[in-house]
Amino acid sequence: MTNDWFLMADRVLAGEEISDDEALAILNCPADELLLLLHGSYNIRRHYYGNKVKLNMIINAKSGLCPENCGYCAQSSLSTAPVDKYTFINRMSLLRGAEQADKLNAGTYCIVASGRGPSKREVDTVSSAVKEIKDKYNLKVCACMGILKPKQALQLKDAGVDRYNHNINTSKTHHSNITTSHTYDDRVSTVNTVKEAAISPCSGVIVGMKETKEDVINMARTLKVLDADSIPVNFLHAIDGTPLEGTNELYPNYCLKVLALFRYINPTKEIRISGGREVNLRSMQPFGLYPANSIFVGDYLTTVGQETTADHKMIEDLGFEIDYCQLSEEQM
């Protein structure tokens, strides 16, 4: 097996899949080859996305009050972290969030709610707001509301929701170490329900939860099989009061290797650097945009993000450009 990252990228662009040995070699890439690895992943990224960067913004539409026991989450039933707790916000609050997303040049507005799955009232509120958001702003709308029923998915589709996020979070073999209140198959089933409703599927992972490198490779391959259009790659930001409190196994170079791996395995997909970007990539954040083509701006659900002006400046300094053209004529 060769560690010639450029040749590997050429093979990926020709339609080949990398082997498990090659995938592991990416995660074990020596420091003196990291820039070459990133260059190889950038060749793939540039082929499909040029130098454009998609911006996404989250609104935390319902905070805390979650019955699930996910070990990473400050909003879970096991968490003692001091987070805001409130029920689902109203339509006007969702509209104000969309206005803010538009001002930040975010092409995708992500409506995120805690909980196992949405109630009828919550789906109705989002459905009502989305129609008005689409009338006022050139935004994609992504909903993330937990396990979704087929009728709920169809209602969101009819309202104009473009994308639905439900992360697999980790590998199937590691899932029970992270949560037991729902199954891995529950998560996969929701992604498939979204696809059946003709909503663009968004599904990603959280890296740094004591998984193995083989787990990370399995995550990337699972998302390829699921054909997720958008893949958010989160890096654990361990929060005091959660079961994963004190976990600190990530470092910037490894995070960059993970992003490169996801690009090599999912070459055509939107790879988004998501939660934990600032605390785990640190000064290496700009390098993440060589394999990835999307980031969040503003704050996350329970943690603070980088200043939006700094994100815009980072993109400009790289010689990249914000992708403003998020919606096709058919979607508008």
Image (cartoon, rainbow, N blue to C red):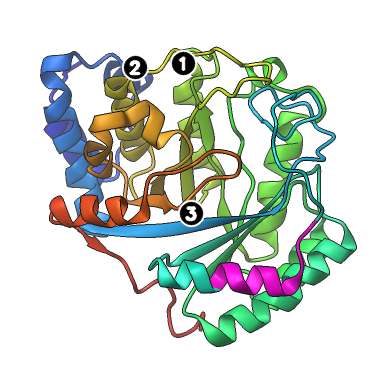
Q: Residues within 10 Å of mark 2 (few under 14, many from 20)?
A: some
Determine the residue positioned at 82% across, 62% down. 122
Residue 140's spot in the image, x, y percent? 51, 69
* Secondary structure under the numbered disc 3 in the rendered image: loop
Residue 277's spot in the image, x, y percent? 39, 36
Specify whether 57 is left or right of 86: left
Disc 2 and disc 1 in contact, CB within 8 angstroms: yes
Residue 95's spot in the image, x, y percent? 63, 74
Disc 2 and disc 3 in contact, CB within 8 angstroms: no
* Residue 311 higher or lower than 206, as above or below: below
Magenta segment includes 147:
no
Mark 2 vs mark 3, CA separation in Å: 24 Å
- Location of mark 2 (residue): 24
- Location of mark 3 (residue): 229
- Location of mark 1 (residue): 214
- The numbered mark, 2 or 1, whose residue comes first in the sequence reads 2
Q: Amino acid at mark 3?
A: Asp
- The numbered mark, 3 or 1, whose residue comes first in the sequence reads 1
Q: In the image, which residues are magenta? A: 88-98
Q: Amino acid at mark 2?
A: Leu
* Residue 216 higher or lower than 142, as above or below: above
* Secondary structure under the numbered disc 1 in the rendered image: helix
